[in-house]
Image (cartoon, helix red, strand yellow):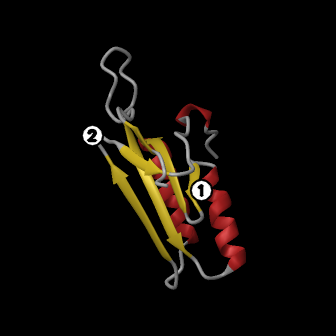
């Protein structure tokens, strides 16, 4: 039996011409941190910006100021032995996923 495929499109990544709202960027953060305590602290940091979609992966839709704040916090957190990757998707974006998962509501995020 194969997992059901779900997709979400039209991520709110552009400037809304009607309201002039700030452009947003879809961000995928994946990481490999070997120290358990630091990995837990990093996941807590990321949960203030987005939603966990896998064990070491978070998604978020961020305005520029929130993306800047995230990058500053990761800069202070990261160590040379870590492997942290932040993928930024601008313009037309779409995500396809299979199995357990749901579309997180970006409006539910409370930024730290």
Outermost residue to the right? 37
Image coordinates for residue 1, horizontal then vertical, percent? 49, 55
Image coordinates for residue 19, horizontal then vertical, percent? 38, 16
Q: The residue tagged with tag 2: helix, strand or loop? A: loop
Viewer-nearest residue: 103 or 32: 103
- In the image, is residue 10 above or below residue 112? above
Q: Which residue is at a point 57% across and 48% down the rendered structure image?
A: 49
**Number of numbered discs:** 2
Outermost residue to the top? 18
- In the image, is residue 93 above or below residue 10? below
Left or right: 61 with respect to 45? left
Left or right: 54 with respect to 92? right
**Mark 2 or 1, nearer chain start:** 1
How crowded pointer 2 is (Cα within 10 Å; few <14, some 14-19, many 20+) is rated as some
Left or right: 21 with respect to 38? left
Q: The residue tagged with tag 1: helix, strand or loop? A: helix
Q: Which residue is at a point 34% across and 42% down the rendered structure image?
A: 94
Mark 2 near mark 1, Cβ–Cβ under 8 Å? no
Outermost residue to the bottom? 81
- In the image, is residue 55 above or below residue 104? below
Q: Quadrant of residue 28?
A: bottom left
Q: Which residue is at a point 48% across and 65% down the rendered structure image?
A: 30
Whole-angstrom CA distance, mark 2 to mark 1, is 23 Å
Provide the residue designation for mark 1.
46
Outermost residue to the left? 91
Left or right: 58 with respect to 10? right
Q: Which residue is at a point 68% across and 59% down the rendered structure image?
A: 44
Image coordinates for residue 58, horizontal then vertical, percent? 53, 55
Provide the residue designation for mark 2.
91
How crowded pointer 1 is (Cα within 10 Å; few <14, some 14-19, many 20+) is rated as many
Q: Which mark is residue 87?
A: none
């Amino acid at each position: 039996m194969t997992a059901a495929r779900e997709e979400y499109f039209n991520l709110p990544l552009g400037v809304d011409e009607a309201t002039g709202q700030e452009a947003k960027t879809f961000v995928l953060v994946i990481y490999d941190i070997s120290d358990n305590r630091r990995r837990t602290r990093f996941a807590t940091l990321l949960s203030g910006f987005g939603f966990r979609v896998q064990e070491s992966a978070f998604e978020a839709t961020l305005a520029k100021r929130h993306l800047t704040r995230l990058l500053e916090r990761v800069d202070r957190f990261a160590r040379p032995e870590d492997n942290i990757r932040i993928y930024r998707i601008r313009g037309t974006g779409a995500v396809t996923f299979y199995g357990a998962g749901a579309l997180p509501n970006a409006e539910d995020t409370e930024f730290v």
